[in-house]
Image (tube, rainbow, N blue to C red):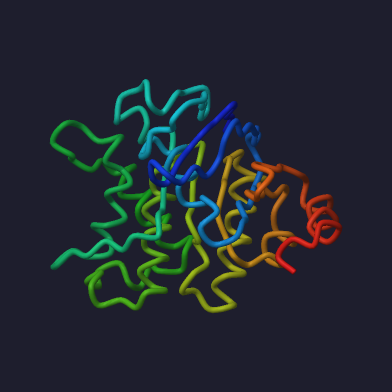
Amino acid sequence: MIRFSNLTISHAPDKRLLAGASAHIPAGSLCALIGRNGSGKSTLLRTLAGLSRPESGNILIADTDPYKTSPVKLAQTIAVVTTERIRVANLRCRDVVALGRAPFTNWIGRMRQDDIKWVDHALGLVGMAEFADRQLSSLSDGESQRIMLARALAQDTPVILLDEPTSFLDIPNRIQLINLLADLAHNHGKCILFSTHELDLAISSSDSLLLIDSAGIIHLPAPQMEDYLHANAIFS
């Protein structure tokens, strides 16, 4: 579902992050992206999402090259939540989540009944239904993060890319979110890749881990990755 090969990306002309990296993450799986600060996790996610073109290499997301397709087709294939905060005035949470349905509405953006149901469903999944008519600007960082997740879920794409989705969330909401992502992957066939600094959470909840380190990309099932990290004293 997510496949890349011989991928080379840089953060700046003089800072190469990955060279010749390859990996395959199948449908129906939850994969955690880990690595030290500055290793290139966010840049890799942006590259896979079609937001930052690589220097070289091949990328297929649900059999679609994100750099050779239309913006609408791409938005119907990949939902993305970055660490950037949307700053808007006078926009309700419901309106923000409804943006996730934009790739499926007509040219004037008219919401059908099915689209409205998706918005309500997504708000409920992240426990934010009671905030639907609140102004986004009135929410805390954690609450805003959950609204951004709801927008991605309302998009109902086969692939979801999340950059630090548990940041700003308290422990109960972190657990709820990870359980939700696992359910979407295992019971609904989604392919979900999320970056995190929480190594214990990544190992305990994910099917596999994608590690960026000095050796490049290493992709292993969660139990094997735990052994690899200990054996090589990574993050110690």
**Above or below for 139 versus 193:** below
> Residue 221 location in percent, x, y?
78, 46
| Horizontal side, residue 154 vs residue 16: left or right | left
Q: Which residue is drawn at 65% across and 42% down?
A: 216
Q: Which residue is drawn at 61% across and 56% down?
A: 35
Quarter of the rendering occupied by the N terminus: top right
> Residue 209 location in percent, x, y?
69, 49
Along the viewing direction, whichever of 142 and 33 lies nearer the viewer:
33
**Above or below for 152 versus 59:** below
Along the viewing direction, whichever of 229 and 69 lies nearer the viewer:
229
Tell me, yes or no, if residue 1 can be seen here. no
Along the viewing direction, whichever of 230 and 75 lies nearer the viewer:
230
**Above or below for 59 versus 144:** above
> Residue 193 location in percent, x, y?
57, 47
Q: Residue at x 35, y 22 (%)?
A: 69
| Horizontal side, residue 118 vs residue 233: left or right | left
Along the viewing direction, whichever of 57 and 177 lies nearer the viewer:
57
**Above or below for 231 versus 13:** below
Q: Which residue is drawn at 58% across and 58% down?
A: 180
| Horizontal side, residue 222 vs residue 167: left or right | right
Quarter of the rendering occupied by the C terminus: bottom right
> Residue 208 location in percent, x, y?
72, 47
Tell me, yes or no, if residue 118 can be seen here. yes
The tally of labels here is 0
> Residue 18's quadrant in the figure?
top right
Q: Which residue lies furthest to the front in this view?
A: 14
